[in-house]
Amino acid sequence: MIIAILLATIVLSGISGQLSSSFSSGPAGTLLRRAAALLDHGSSPGAGNLNLSREEVSLLRDPYAKRIHEPAVQLAALEDIQRHLEGRFPWAWQGRMNAAIGAVFPEDREELVSMYGRLSRYDAWLKSEWAALMGKADRHELLWKKRREIFGREADFIWAGELKSAGVLGNLDEIDKEKGFTITGKLTAFENEIRKAYGEDADAYMETRRQDLLEKFITMPGVQAELKAMDNLTRRENLMIVRRAFGMDEETLARWEKLDTIRDRRWENGMTYMEERTRIIGAFKGDVREQRIRDLRERYFGVEAPVIAGEEQAGYFRFEAERIHGLN
């Protein structure tokens, strides 16, 4: 929902293909985390049936906790929670959103749920008015009128850096296309672009937008291609370099390294499952085939087998989705 708001706003504002300062997650959009599976251990108190691990709660909370009362930071935090739920519960994330907000930010739940409600209202308006807005010359003014109607003065803070941010992130795309640039070279070039655009405000901008900038960087085609070509250990080391460059502390880096290891193991498990599933489909028919696939799911996914089965019945195979290294 939030990403739909951002992408629609960008196009309607005439910034095709770029990201606004509203903390959009990048060109991969809501599909980035569709392949993420459940972590079913170490649940945090208050997480309820979400079964969020302490590591997950910390990674969703820590980038935003210090400035969570700023409207733009709230938008970023809510978007991160939404994307995570979409990966965990691809077909039923909406009904868990309020519970997840409470699990990640229990002391600020009411304020964030209210913000999410306004975002939902804005999203509904964009969807209903999309076709009409595209044909109007004054669409920018109409967008801002609706933003201020729903968000009040907070709209000015949420969308204040829209054009400047779009320009910086657009330059990042050009950096990614530069031949001969390694990941570390692209990191240096990107930071230089930010400092050129924001001057003395660059550090504050990078701190506020850390997760957004990080995800934009690691989802670039060139960076993903380089990460994909690495073995698991080398890739995790390079992801640590990137995250450290974006200001993450050692404690957070350790949690990310643990999650990266879990994700690598999960994908290896999933890919092996898909290979065996394909073999069973080719070798058996009817009830025998279905029983063998059920047994296979239980063997590879345990208590998560029913979730996988439901997805497959709906035609969704999470391990056929694209893997975005560093995100799922």
Image: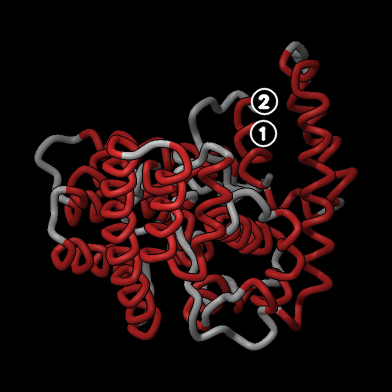
Residue name at image x 55 percent, y 59 percent: 306
Q: CA distance from mark 1 to mark 2?
A: 5 Å
- Is there any visible trace of residue 193 in the rendered image? no
Quadrant (top left, top right, bottom left, bottom right) of the C terminus = bottom left
Report if the CB atoms under discs 1 and 2 are less than 8 Å apart.
yes
Residue bearing the label numbered 2: 12
Residue name at image x 64 percent, y 71 percent: 50
Q: Is residue 140 left or right of residue 191?
A: right
The residue at the far right in this view is: 149
Identify the mark at residue 9; answer none if there is no mark. 1
What is the image's colouring? secondary structure
Query: Is residue 65 depicted above or below 307 in this figure?
Result: below
Query: Is residue 210 depicted above or below 62 in this figure?
Result: above
Q: Is residue 194 left or right of residue 127?
A: left
Label 2: few (<14), some (14–19) or many (≥20) C-alpha neighbours in 10 Å: some
137 and 315: which one is in front? 315
Q: Is residue 324 left or right of residue 315?
A: left
Residue name at image x 49 percent, y 43 percent: 31
Residue name at image x 13 percent, y 59 percent: 231
